[in-house]
Image (cartoon, rainbow, N blue to C red):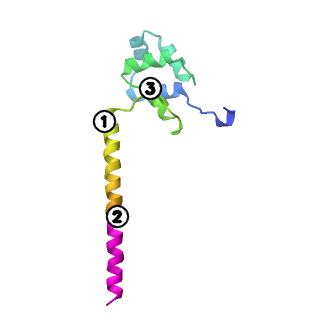
């Protein structure tokens, strides 16, 4: 990957923003994670963190930071993550509904065209 194409996701800033939204002090977060408050501040300044650290934050906050990171990647990137059954059912239902609407639209267009012909013949 060329530098100009490189994706910039600042993991520490993402954590910092989340911690700020939670309204918890760095000391309190550190205490709950078994870390010093200064370590939490250090993490928040780092553009990259290893997955073990991110997992610790995810477990503590009961928040999926990995999903947050994944959402920042381009949509064309693939994933092996399974889609939830509910999401697949919704997608299938929407596809059926879309097809029904397309079929209805064809009928409406044909009726419109027929009505135009009838109106011209008057």
Q: Quadrant of residue 45?
A: top right
Point 35% across, 48% down: residue: 95
* Residue nearest the observer in this picture, 70 or 104: 104
Q: Position of residue 39 (x, y in %)?
A: 51, 14
Disc nearer the start of the sequence (3/2): 3
Q: Position of residue 31 (x, y in %)?
A: 40, 11
Q: Which mark is residue 86?
A: 1
Determine if the magenta segment contains residue 117: yes
How far is the residue under mark 3 from the one under mark 2? 43 Å
Q: Please name the residue that numbered disc 3 is placed on.
A: 65
**Quadrant of the drawing holding the N terminus:** top right
Determine if the magenta segment contains residue 114: yes
Point 69% across, 33% down: residue: 2
Q: Which mark is residue 113?
A: none
What is the magenta segment's predominant secondary structure?
helix
Disc nearer the start of the sequence (1/3): 3
Q: Is residue 111 above or below residue 104?
A: below
SS type, badge 2: helix
**Quadrant of the drawing holding the C terminus:** bottom left
How far is the residue under mark 2 from the one under mark 1? 28 Å
SS type, badge 1: helix
């Amino acid at each position: 990957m060329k530098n100009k194409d490189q994706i910039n996701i600042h993991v520490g800033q993402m954590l910092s923003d989340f911690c700020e939204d939670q309204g918890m002090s760095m000391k309190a977060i550190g205490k709950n994670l078994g870390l010093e408050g200064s370590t939490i501040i250090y993490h928040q300044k780092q553009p990259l963190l290893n997955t073990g650290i991110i997992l610790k934050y995810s477990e503590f906050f009961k928040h999926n930071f990995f999903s947050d990171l994944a959402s920042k990647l381009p949509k064309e990137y693939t994933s092996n993550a399974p889609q939830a059954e509910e999401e697949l059912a919704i997608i299938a239902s929407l596809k059926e509904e879309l097809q029904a609407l397309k079929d209805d639209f064809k009928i409406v267009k044909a009726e419109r065209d027929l009505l135009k012909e009838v109106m011209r013949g008057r």
